[in-house]
Amino acid sequence: MVAKKAIPRQATKARTAHVRPPARSVAGLDPAAAAVKARPRPRRARLSAAEVAAIFRRFQEIEPSPTGELEHTNPFTLLVAVVLSAQATDAGVNKATRGLFALAQSPQEMLALGEERVRDAIKTIGLYRNKAKNVILLSRQLIELHAGEVPADRDQLETLAGVGRKTANVVMNVAFGAPTMAVDTHVFRVANRIGLSSGKTPLAVEKDLVKAIPPEFGVPAHHWLILHGRYLCKARKPECYRCPIREFCRFEPKTEAPGKTTGRSSPKG
Ligand code: SF4
């Protein structure tokens, strides 16, 4: 039988020093505990302005003229498509709006079509009953308050039925070329991973991005980040091994190409 080795009191203290924060100053600690306390914690350095510019330059090289994927023919159909896209995929919305926009492409035509036929045209989309109500109501608001035109102003857009900050940002950006940043699930994730923001809410991320992105990239940046999140920096498994901005991105650990080993040997049995 192997006798248990007594653990010296000093060693026990050192081993648990990181668990129980000592009340004394570092200078007053024994050497082992002081070493634990003084060890620098890993910190993700913030992206510099030069790195942020380099990221967007790279996006620009790859896709100089990015566009959104929601099909539309004018600011009104864009507004309707974005309202319908809440909790739905762009592909699903496009499938429904192809039929809807064949019947109505203006607030007047939409109002004339009526809620029931709008509902029928978009019934493949989630929350379609409520969305049909909003499409009719916002068409009426546009006719009565904005002479049938979609306003280019955020506050005015947000008074329309079914239009929140994100929708207003998309419409301002895509229809009117404003350097707005609509933060959807992709932009929120990508901005936090890359290190462009550490915001905990879409509004905080939006503000960080608008502040950080150089003005010359302000309009297309929204599309670049969405496309990057949708096709490469995916939620479950980002494809870091083929990412064009990998060298700048703060996300760790980065993923490796399927089948590639990390170089670490596996434990032998
Ligand atoms: S390196 Fe990976 S985590 Fe970072 S942006 Fe690229 S795909 Fe996303």
Image (spheres, rainbow, N blue to C red):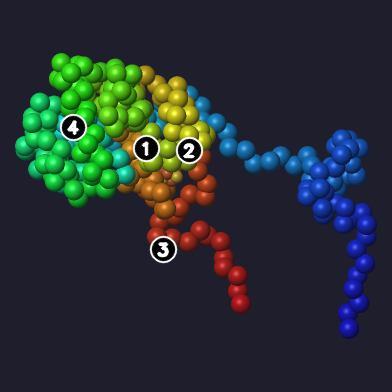
Sequence-wise, the earlier of marks 2 and 1 is 1
Camera-near label (3 vs 2) is 2
Disc 3 designates what residue?
259
* Amino acid, disc 3: Gly
Question: In the rendering, at what x and y percent does residue 180 appear?
Answer: 34, 24
Disc 4 designates what residue?
136
Q: CA distance from mark 1 to mark 4?
A: 25 Å
Ligand 1 quadrant assignment = top left
Q: Secondary structure at mark 3?
A: loop
Q: Does residue 40 appear in the picture of this structure?
A: yes
Q: CA distance from mark 3 to mark 2?
A: 27 Å
Sequence-wise, the earlier of marks 1 and 3 is 1
Disc 2 designates what residue?
192
Which quadrant does the C terminus fall into?
A: bottom right
**Where 18 falls versus 217 (above or below)?**
below
Relative to 239, is 129 on the left or the right?
A: left
Disc 1 designates what residue?
184
Q: Secondary structure at mark 4?
A: helix
Sequence-wise, the earlier of marks 3 and 2 is 2
* Amino acid, disc 4: Ile
* Amino acid, disc 1: Asp
Camera-near label (3 vs 4) is 4
Camera-near label (2 vs 1) is 1
Relative to 73, is 67 on the left or the right?
A: right
Which residue is located at x 79 percent, y 45 percent?
Answer: 36
Asked whether the residues under the numbered discs 3 and 2 touch, taking CB atoms below 8 Å apart as contact, a structural biologist would say no
**Where 54 falls versus 261 (above or below)?**
above
Sequence-wise, the earlier of marks 4 and 2 is 4
Q: Secondary structure at mark 1?
A: loop
